Image: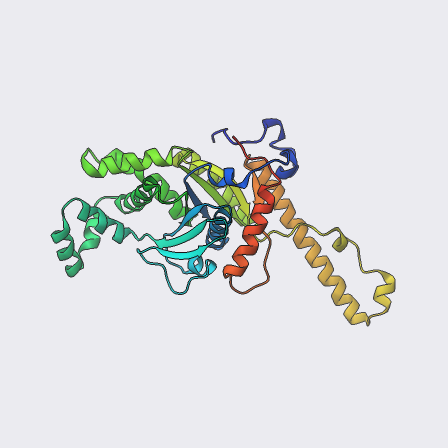
Amino acid sequence: MKTSDKAPEQDFFSGKSLRARYPPRVDPVAFFERSSVVVVAGKGGVGKSTVSAAIAVAAASCGLRVLAVELEGRGELPRALGLDGPLTWDERDALAEPSGGSVTARRIRPDDALVEWLQAHALGPVVRRLRTSGALEVVAFAIPGIREVLVLGKLKALERTGSFDLLVVDAPATGHAITLLTSPAGLTGVARGGPVRRNAEEVAEMLGDPARCRVVLVTLPRELAVDETIEAAYEVEDRAGVKLSEVVVNQYVAPDAALDEPLDTIDAASLTQQIAAAVEAARAFESARQRAAAAEVDRLAAALPLRQLTLPRLEVDRIGLAETRTLADALLTQLRQVEVAP
C-alpha cells in the first residue's frame, strides 16, 4: 500500500482514534477538491449510495458543482438526493445551494457508454442494426473488460470537460468495483493498439493520478464488513493502483458511558421486577453492541493507516434528502475537526 496521506507510522497501531492524531485545522473545500473524481466503494449493504449522496450534498453546500453518478441503477442514490424515479443517461438537476453549489445526477450504463463510443467512431448505422437485432451484447462481451473501460472512459470524458468541480461515483459492491478499477490495466495488456487501447491507457492514467481520482471506502462497524474493507483497501491500491482516501464508517454510534452502569437500585425499585429486568437486559445489550462497534473501528484504524470519518445511525426506514443533509452536516463537522492531508 502506498504511504501518502497516511498518519505518522508510529501511530498506526496505537489504538487511538484518528481524529485525536490530527490538529484541528481544515477547510472542507480542500477535502473535496483533492481530486476531481471520488469513487465510493464498499461491501454491498454498507450504505455506499447514502454516503455518495452525503458527500455530494456536503460538497455542494461548500459551493462546488457536483455530478453524482450511479452505475448500478438500484435507486438509492436518486432517492437520497430527493429525486423521484430512476436515473438515466441524461443529467438531472437534484439541488442548488445558496452557496452557489449544486448537485446534478445521472446514471452511466455500460451499454449506453458502448453505444456512445461506437457512434463517436462513425459506427452509428452499425449500432442501430445491432440494437434492433439485440446483438449489441455480443460486442460488449467480445472484448474482456471493454464494458468497464468504456464506463470509466465516460467518467474520464466528464472529468475533462471541467463542467463539474467534483464527480462522486456510486460504485458497485466491492468485488465488482475491483473488477471495474482493474479493467483498464487488463485491457491495455490484451489490446495491441487502436482506439480501444488508447482509451484504456487514458483511463488508467486518470485512475493512477491522485489529483484526478481517489477511492473512499465505506464500511459498517461490524466484523465481516471491516474484514472485507481491509482486504479491499489493499486490492484497490496494489492491483488497481488507485489512491485511497478516507474510510467512512457508516451507522456508527460511539459508546455511551452511561450504558455501562447497571440500573440504579432506587430506579429499579420504582419498577416491577419484570420491567426492571427488561430494562437491564436492553441496557446491557446496547452497551455490548456499542462496545463491539468501537472495537471494530479501532481494529480498522490499526489495520489501515487511513483517516476515518463516521456517520451516525439514523432511525428511519429510507434515506431521503432531509436525512442526507443531516449526514452531510455530520461529515462537514468532522472535516472541520481534522487536518486535511497535503
Pick the front one: 23 or 28: 28
Give the total number of marks visible in the rendering: 0
**The image quarter in which residue 26 lies:** top right
Q: Is residue 26 above or below residue 99?
A: above
Say if residue 169 shows up in the picture: no
Residue 155 x %, y %: 33, 44
x, y (%) of residue 101? Answer: 46, 49
Res 248 visible = yes
| Percent of width and height locating residue 306 | 54, 36
Q: Quadrant of residue 120?
A: top left
Colour logic:
rainbow
Residue at image position (22%, 44%) is: 143
112 sits to left or right of 107: left
Please say if 309 is above or below 276: above
Q: In this rendered view, identify the residue nearer to me: 127 or 223.
A: 127
**Of 244 and 298, the residue lying toward us:** 244
Q: Residue at x 54, y 41 (%)?
A: 28
**In this rendering, position of residue 181 left or right of residue 127:** right
Q: Foreground: 70 or 286?
A: 70
In-image side of 127 versus 97 (left or right): left
Residue at 32 percent of width and 39 percent of height:
160
